[in-house]
Each structure stands twice: as C-alpha cells, then as structure tokens.
Amino acid sequence: MTDPKLRVLISAEKIQARVRELGEKISADYPTGKLHMICILKGAAFFMADLARALNRDVSIDFMGISSYGKGKTSSGEVKVTKDLDVTIEGADILIVEDIVDSGVTLNYLMHLLDQRKPRSIRIAALLDKPDHRLRPVHVAYVGFEIPDEFVVGYGLDYAERYRNLDAICVLEDDQQAEL
Ligand code: IMP
Ligand code: MG
C-alpha cells in the first residue's frame, strides 16, 4: 500500500525473519509438555498466527479481549476485559502473545489477573516494545523489536481500527492525524 501518511519502520521480510527466530527460541525453551498460547485481541492476531506456525511443537491456543486504548492514540489508563478465555489455565504453561508493550498498563493488569488462576508458568511474547514509555513494570521474555516512542500501525496494529492488514510495521506520521 502506498500511503503518504505511512513510513515503513520494519519491513515484512524483517518481521517474518524475526518471528522465525522467536519461534526457534521458544521451541527450545519449552522442549516438553503442552504450551498454551493466549492471543490478546485484536492487535496480536497476525503475530499469533505466524508465531504459532513458527513453533516446532504442540500448542493449544485461546483468545482474550482486553483493551486500555480508546479510538485514539493515547491510553485511557483503564483496562477492560472484553472477551474472557474459553478454557481454564490452571496448571498450564502459558505464553501470552501481545502486539506491543507501551505503558505496560495492559500487561501488568493481565499478568495479575491470570496469575490468580494458578497457571504453572506464564511468559509474555510481544512483537514490539516501546521501553521509553513504561509506567508499570512488565517482564517480556520474548521481544521481537524495540522501537522508539512513535505511534505505529500494521501487522495487526491499528489506528481507529485502520491499517491492521499492512504486512509491514509503519509509523503513522504525526501531522496527518487530524485528517483521520
Ligand atoms: P499499554 O497498556 O500502554 O502497554 O498498551 C498496550 C496496547 O496499546 C497495545 O496492545 C496496543 O493495542 C496499544 N498500543 C500501544 N502503542 C501502540 C501503537 O504505537 N500503535 C497501535 N497501538 C498501540
Ligand atoms: Mg493490544
């Protein structure tokens, strides 16, 4: 897609290569047993689909809807569960799959919530990390790319529900946002 508002930050090829690397690392870290992947909707759906296929092992998957962002670009600071898990996670090895860690508010909340359900272990894989903007501590075991504090879209990430289907991660240029 050629759109003057978008600047490619991470190409589709780089994303795919990095997801394969993460897949190898995660497969090696969990050599036996079941791995239960939890995709945080909607932004992580594309990452989840590619990462699950990059894992050389048996997995099960579930989806959770959780949001701390409204329609715009700044966090409301409020976390809301919009869709809960379908199956219990007690005793399971959990891999949370998230698109991006920004303030950390969403994942900090989610880790506490899921911890109460007594999984055997719980780790986070996030495609993107914006460490400059952290308000709450979050340990991310598997990070795809660290990026600067800019608003990005594509590969699942949206601005007001647009741009999720871009195959690259792009910066949405600032001066254009009023038009959207
Ligand atoms: P946090 O709670 O501030 O860490 O925000 C995490 C959520 O905010 C992510 O799951 C995204 O849905 C959204 N988010 C944060 N930064 C961006 C961005 O640059 N582009 C699109 N969505 C973002
Ligand atoms: Mg999200």
Image (cartoon, rainbow, N blue to C red):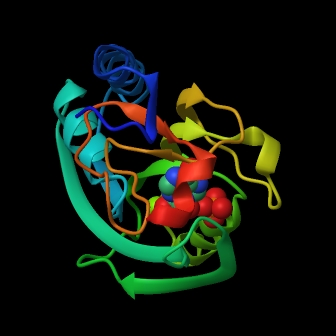
Residue 71 percent coordinates (x, y): 48, 76
Residue 92 percent coordinates (x, y): 38, 58
Residue at the image point whose x is 79% and y is 52% from the top: 134
| Number of numbered markers | 0
Q: Is residue 85 above or below residue 155?
A: below
Residue at the image point whose x is 40% and y is 23% from the top: 22
Q: Is residue 155 shown left or right of residue 86?
A: right
Q: Is residue 36 above or below residue 54?
A: below
Quadrant in which residue 18 is drawn: top left
Q: Is residue 52 shown left or right of residue 15?
A: left
> In the rendered image, which quarter contains the N terminus?
top left
Residue at the image point whose x is 28% and y is 67% from the top: 63
Is residue 153 among what the camera can see? yes
Residue 168 percent coordinates (x, y): 33, 30
Q: Is residue 9 shown left or right of residue 130?
A: left
Residue 115 percent coordinates (x, y): 58, 70
Is residue 122 among what the camera can see? no
> In the rendered image, which quarter contains the C terminus?
bottom left
Q: Is residue 151 shown left or right of residue 90?
A: right
